[in-house]
Amino acid sequence: MTATRRANLVAAAALVFSMAGAIATLHAIDHTRRASAAQEALYVRSSKVLRRMSLGYTGLLADIYWTRAVQYFGERHHHGSRDFRLLAPLLEVTTELDPRLLPAYQFGANFLAPKPPNGAGLPGSALFLMKYGIEHNPGQWRLYYNLGFLYYTEFKDYAKAADAFAQGAKLPVTNEYMPILAARMAQHAGEFDTARMLWRMTYESTKDPQIRDNAVQHLLALQVDEDVTRLEQVVEKYREQTGRLPASMGDLERAGFIHGTPADPKGRPYKLMPDGRIEVQDPESIFFITKGLPPGAAPPQPLHQIEPESR
């Protein structure tokens, strides 16, 4: 047997072994039991060990672990679980195996940061993930945007959000909104306008239908929150001028405070309550609202399985 043929046989055997290992890993993933004890197992937690096992096919294993992370989050999110203990380790292994797998950072942060049941409630882990992503992909402005978004929404740290947006704005390829967001964060001004710009930018910067729908839902919620805030301010002005609360929206219109009947983005008129509060007609129809809810009601949240963009 020639040396060339021996080398080809060894290479073929290595490839078969690698593919067999990948198939076995997928089989283990698909048949992992859902019991809480089994959920503590993460197959192989060490990316160093996995790199040796992969025989150079680290990208393939990264895809496998990323698929498992999405399946794991989607299943638990769909069932309204509050236990996401494997999510951060799955994402950590995924990105260590392939630091350039950008969807793992963008989607992973969205999985980790929000409070259960819409996320793992681990904004610190999301922050670590985003910083790791930027360290290994410093030219990707979307990662700086995601980092600034995280600082703004989860930590209310305007200074660090401004810095993240400003860094992203300096990149050769960036988005025109980045310097505007940096300036607004630095001024702490226009909360509704700033949030609206963030969600509009989220909508425009992806083609993924789930993320775009999520952005639309947040934009609708912002409109409701802004409407309710403004209307309750109007009610207070009416009370200051007349010494009593308005009995109806008609009172506000006759006094010149409003024109027509204010309605939510779904076209339903807002309700004026006897104590002067403003409520929406159907709180379950507009997700993420924080204003216009009955006393003690929690903001309605969508419950669906999330699928990621391809690379």
Image: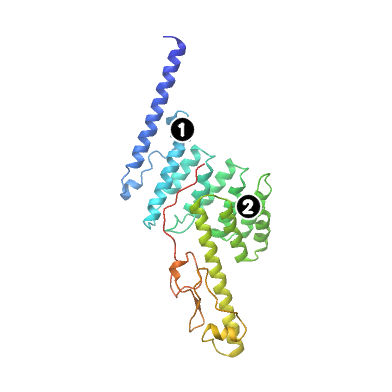
Residue type of the residue flagged with mark 1: Arg
Q: Where's residue 74, x and y in %?
A: 41, 51
Badge 1 density bin: few <14, some 14–19, many ≥20, Cα 10 Å: some
Q: Identify the residue shown where x is 47% and y is 33%.
A: 58
CB under 8 Å between discs 1 and 2: no
Q: Identify the residue shown where x is 45% and y is 67%.
A: 285
Instruction: Specify whether residue 211 is in view.
Output: yes
Badge 2 density bin: few <14, some 14–19, many ≥20, Cα 10 Å: many
| Residue 68 picture quarter | top left
SS under mark 2: helix
The residues bearing labels 1 and 2 have C-alpha atoms spaced at a distance of 32 Å
Task: Give whichever of 280, 7 is nearer the camera.
Answer: 280
Q: Identify the residue shown where x is 46% and y is 59%.
A: 115
SS under mark 1: helix
Residue 140's place in the image compared with 259, above or below, is above
Q: Which residue is mark 2?
A: 164
Q: Which residue is mark 1?
A: 51
| Side of 23 where 258 appears, left or right | right
Image quadrant containing the N terminus: top left
Residue 168's place in the image compared with 301, above or below, is above
Task: Give whichever of 303, 285 is nearer the camera.
Answer: 285
Q: Identify the residue shown where x is 55% and y is 48%.
A: 130
Residue at the far bottom in the pictured view: 243
Of mark 1 and mark 2, the one earlier in the sequence is 1
Residue 181's place in the image compared with 190, above or below, is above
| Residue 132 picture quarter | top right
Q: Where's residue 8, x and y in %?
A: 44, 17
